Amino acid sequence: MAQSTRTLILEQLKSARTALAEGWGVLRQRGPSQIQFWFIALLVGIAAGFAALAFRMAITELQAVIYEADDRLHLHSFAATLPWYVLLIIPTIGGLVVGLIFYWFTDDGRVRSVADVIEGAALQDGRVETRAGIASMFASLITLSSGGSSGREGPVVHMAGVISTWVSNRLDADGITGRDLLGCAVAAAVSASFNAPIAGALFALEVVLRHFAVHAFAPIVIASIAGTVINRLAYGDVTEFLLQTPGSLQFYVELPAFLILGLVCGLVSLLVMRGIFLAEDVGSHLQSRLHLPSWLRPAVSGAMLGGIAIWFPHIIGVGYETTLRALSGDLVLHTAVIFAIVKTVALAITMGGRMGGGVFSPSLMIGALTGLAFGLIATGLLPSVSGTHTLYAFAGMGAVAAAVLGAPISTTLIVFELTGDWQIGLAVMASVSISTALASRLVDRSFFLTQLERRDIHLAAGPQAYLLAMMRAGAVMRPLGDPNGASPEEIQPLLDRGLCINARATLEAAMPIFDREDMAWLPVVTLDDEGVETPVGVLYHIDALKAYNRALAATAAEEHS
């Protein structure tokens, strides 16, 4: 028995020495390049962090000039003292400037935001549009400074994507490296913007890259730390919301109320998302019917926002003051409900009017107001078994934002980091889980993925749904004259029947034809300027399936590496 134990120990030591030797060999071969990439990730994180910080400071400075408000936490109080015509004119002029920016620098007059970064990660090897992205940043800066009712995370995330795209193009980076650099830039930008290093890193993984590959974790964390350090050098080690009345949970007895709050917040988030999409559709319909120039659409939306701000100045900008009041319980029930409704309408007008900005910060505000209203009712009905109503505002803030973003993990953590209160974990997690589960069934996973779905970009269902759209028939076909392909004589009968596919078409269009016609191959043609078809090759069903399988395998390998 003693001999057996000794033998076992010696075998384990031998295995350990072998593993260490192999590890040292890998470190010598790959270590320098890996360390070099981490250094590049750090530089990308620093650049994105400073860009996010500059964007945030620029908003504050412009708001101070426009609204004469030196304190962003009391912007609404300053705005309420201005004459009504000033509140009307400022967002109208801001919308006009935004419209002209989009008219001159984009092809479609549409702001670039988080959805476009997700698309770039999935379909463009981690690249995003540069020209339109820079235009969106300046347009969103004008929007948020002049009265637009949106958030800053959308332009900040896309701005980070522009930085990583520039670096990836300089390095001629492949898809995996480009996506990793994009994740690093996004993590740093979110961290620098909100002083939330944990949530910044997880946001990049959960929302943008949509996987938690180990190889991407270290550089993204490094970049996120860099962004946080940049934020704290400018603002100090303080939370986004300074709270004086942290909540307390009456433990198990009160948890069912937070599950119910999750259902309520899931429905509220659905109304927020559907409201934005409805405003977008109505705006496009009216623009077409009234022959309204695209550059005038944001100005009309700005005028509408100005009209609302005359009576409800809390809709202006990100909404820190109102969110803080909700989290502090400094609002009565009917005020919280009215503010939530008006903010939802204002957000829909801003986004539907193509003024720019993001949806995260408004979701936090709407969620805090919803949670506060629910908490006032719940604690009023059962005061003996209830904690403070402000705790419901915390949970509601996270629940609505998580459902809109489709990011329960990073949103839960960002609530903790924004408030500095880690004692509310059970309440926030309970509400977030239910709201996200409900809302994700009623839309395509999240607001961003639903935006892409409305553009016929199918990312919500996963790579098995969108990889076919990434491969062109012309890239997979066997050219005419290939000894293993069909001859021109063999493909002519199919051409006469109209059974062919354009070389520029994707496999997403080809696969249904194979299934419907039960064919082994399909002629591939090109079209000239007069619409004349010229056969150039043959797309075999088996070749399409092989290409699809290779793409799936590569995606799985990246996500699990």
Image: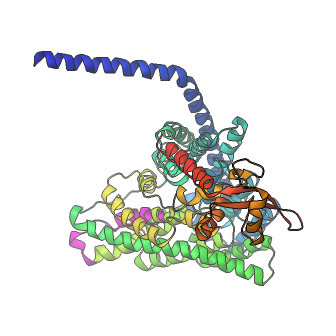
> Image height check: is 554 above or below 388?
above
**Is 503 left or right of 407, judged from the image as shown?**
right
Judged from this view, the residue extending furthest toward the bottom is 289
The residue that appears at 61% across and 63% down in the rendered structure is: 511
x, y (%) of residue 499?
71, 69
Question: What residue span does the magenta drawing correspond to?
Answer: 381-401
x, y (%) of residue 187?
54, 46
| Quarter occupied by residue 260 | bottom left
Judged from this view, the residue extending furthest toward the left is 1
x, y (%) of residue 155?
64, 56
The residue that appears at 27% across and 61% down in the rendered structure is: 249
Which of 513/395 is in front? Answer: 513
The residue that appears at 28% across and 18% down in the rendered structure is: 13
The residue that appears at 22% across and 19% down in the rendered structure is: 9
Q: Can I make out residue 425 in this image?
A: yes
**Is 230 left or right of 166, judged from the image as shown?**
left
> Image height check: is 284 above or below 182?
below
